[in-house]
Image: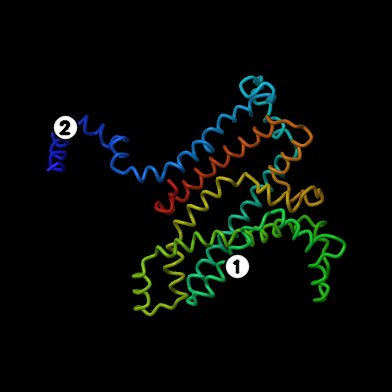
Amino acid sequence: MEVAREAAHEAAAPPARKSASGFRPLARSIRKSPSLYLLALPGVVFLIIFGYFPLYGLLIAFKDFRVTDGILGSPWVGLKNFEFFFTSDQMFPLIRNTVLLNALFISFTTVFAVGIAMFLNEVRLKVFKRISQSVIFFPYFVSWVVVGMMVAAFFGGDKPTVNEWLKALGLREVNWFYVPDIWPWMLTMIKVWHGAGYSSIIYLAAITAIPDELYEAARIDGASRWAMMRRITLPSLYPTISILTLLAVGKIFNGDFGMIYAIVGDDSIIYPTTDVIDTYVFRSMRYLNDFGMSSAVGLFQSVIGFLFVFGVNAVVRRVSKESALF
């Protein structure tokens, strides 16, 4: 009776009032589903504290920031903080390196993560599958500092371990830290080794959501397991791949500082292909101690990443509307 009374009341309401009350008031919705809102509360609070409150710090990019004066007390300097980066002769090489390395990281990590997830999904021996998942996932927990030490041990020093292997195979030795051109690919391999296992878990979870009826119908039609992977599993992953790629593109102007600095450090010989915006700003900060400059570069990276997300999303939306982020 209560439902019928509410329906009659809504039907009798004027059109303007009905359109204005298209959504239930927030208080009424909370009363009806308090547990759902309570479940979302930690995430909302986390987003407000660490996502919106720090936006106040963007003012530093337009000020001559002094710790003693605070953000509001520091004098305005307009766009002067941006001049450091935009007038530098290193700007274009830094942008090129940052975009190129991130493009390699995103593309190769995605390909390997999707491949790992698809092949793990085909494994029928549960014990082997769990062991494989653990082994593949383990590198993600290794600190970049430890990875940097491992790279130095394998490729650095007077007698690099890798060179000993090459010598045993009768191949020519390589002075790894004196050949800048090979480092984008080496960093890409390290990134794939470190992060593909973690990303594969996300894609593996998406695979479990694919209806079993599709596979059963394909088996009835005589499709092989390889054909089902190509015709069912991979196309079903397109929306997930698209969304994760769009999110990654938003940070394409942000170099992986922890990774690159831990591996490359202050080795200027390989800077031409490995120096990114973040490492350049960090080195400059050590000498200039200018907070406004670093904030200006960070704001520039965020704005360009934001525009990249909108641009790539528009392209994806034209190709496949259901694969777009918004």
Q: How many marks?
A: 2
From the image, tell me which residue sits under label 1. Answer: 135
Q: x, y (%) of residue 180?
A: 78, 55
Q: Is residue 34 left or right of residue 162?
A: left
What distance separates the C-alpha of mark 1 from that of mark 2?
A: 62 Å
Q: Which mark is residue 89?
A: none
Which quarter of the figure is the N terminus placed in? Answer: top left
Q: Which residue is more in the foreground, 158 or 271?
A: 158
SS at circle 2: loop
Q: Residue at x 38, y 80 (%)?
A: 222
Seen in the picture, residue 182 relative to 310 is either above or below; the reply is: below
Q: Which residue is more in the foreground, 25 or 82?
A: 25
10 Å crowding of disc 2: few (<14), some (14-19), many (20+)? few
Q: Quadrant of residue 151?
A: bottom right
Q: Residue at x 65, y 51 (%)?
A: 100
- Counting residues from the N terminus, which is met first, the one under dot 1 or under dot 2? 2
Q: Is residue 202 left or right of residue 5?
A: right
* Residue found at the far bottom of this picture: 222
| Amino acid type for the residue under numbered disc 2 | Ala
Q: Which residue is more in the foreground, 176 or 195?
A: 195
Q: Quadrant of residue 140?
A: bottom right
Q: x, y (%) of residue 27?
A: 31, 35
* Residue found at the far right of this picture: 158
| Amino acid type for the residue under numbered disc 1 | Val
Nearer the camera: disc 1 or disc 2: 1
From the image, tell me which residue sits under label 2. Answer: 13
SS at circle 1: helix
Which quarter of the figure is the C terminus placed in? Answer: top left
Seen in the picture, residue 181 relative to 35 is either above or below; the reply is: below
Q: Is residue 215 left or right of residue 123?
A: left
